[in-house]
Image (cartoon, grey):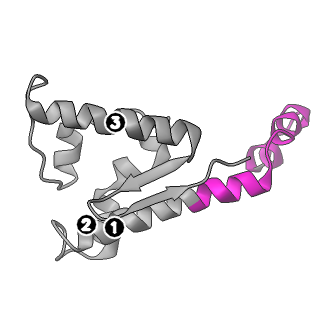
Amino acid sequence: MSKANRTKGRVEPFLQQLARFDAKDIRRIRSAQALSSSISIKCLKTGVMAKKSTAAIEKKLKPFLDPTYTKMHSRPIHYDVAQQCGLPITLHDLRSPIWLTVSALYMRLNHYCTSHASKAIETVNDLFSAPIPH
């Protein structure tokens, strides 16, 4: 909308694009992003980043929380970037037993997020999810 307001030419292409968006969907997406941020920060505040402020954690987690960093949902954030964020990362060989567990978890969550939820965050004790927008 801001690009349409700034344009000196025809606004029809912008209006055509905007017609495809529903404000309720945008609110749901922003709500899911805020939920993800809130849960991530709260979890880290109780563990590896317990001594950091909420603002400091949010700044460190920018690659995970800011969609402009990866440009697209589900793109990987590699270990070196995660380490730079202050997360304690350990690399494991792809043939190690832990990767069988990680692969199985990924497959289950991928299925869950393509059929039942738009986002899922799982801890040892909890599962937080956002519904698929309709």
Which is nearer the eye, 58 or 130? 130
Dot 3 crowding, Cα within 10 Å, few <14, some 14–19, many 20+? few
Count the marks: how many? 3
Extreme residue in the top direction = 95
Residue at which label 1 appears: 41
Dot 2 crowding, Cα within 10 Å, few <14, some 14–19, many 20+? some
Which stretch appears magenta?
A: 2-31
Amino acid type, callout 2? Leu
Residue at which label 3 appears: 106
Instruction: State the residue at coordinates (60%, 58%).
Output: 30
Q: Position of residue 39 (x, y in %)?
A: 39, 66
Q: Position of residue 110 (x, y in %)?
A: 44, 36
Amino acid type, callout 3? Tyr
Instruction: State the residue at coordinates (8%, 28%).
Output: 96
Image position of 49 with respect to 117: above or below: below
Image position of 39 with respect to 19: above or below: below
Instruction: State the residue at coordinates (19%, 30%).
Output: 100
Label 1, secondary structure: give it.
helix
Which is nearer the eye, 82 or 98? 98
Residue at which label 2 appears: 44
Disc 2 and disc 1: Cα gap in Å? Answer: 5 Å
Dot 1 crowding, Cα within 10 Å, few <14, some 14–19, many 20+? many
Label 3, secondary structure: give it.
helix
Q: Is residue 69 magenta?
A: no
Which marked residue is nearer to the observer: mark 2 or mark 3?
A: 3
Disc 3 and disc 1: Cα gap in Å? Answer: 22 Å
User: Answer yes or no: do the residues labelled 2 and 1 have beta carbons within 8 Å?
Assistant: yes
Label 2, secondary structure: give it.
helix
Left/right of residue 96 with respect to residue 115 in the rendered view = left
Instruction: State the residue at coordinates (74%, 46%).
Output: 134
Question: Which numbered disc covers residue 4?
Answer: none
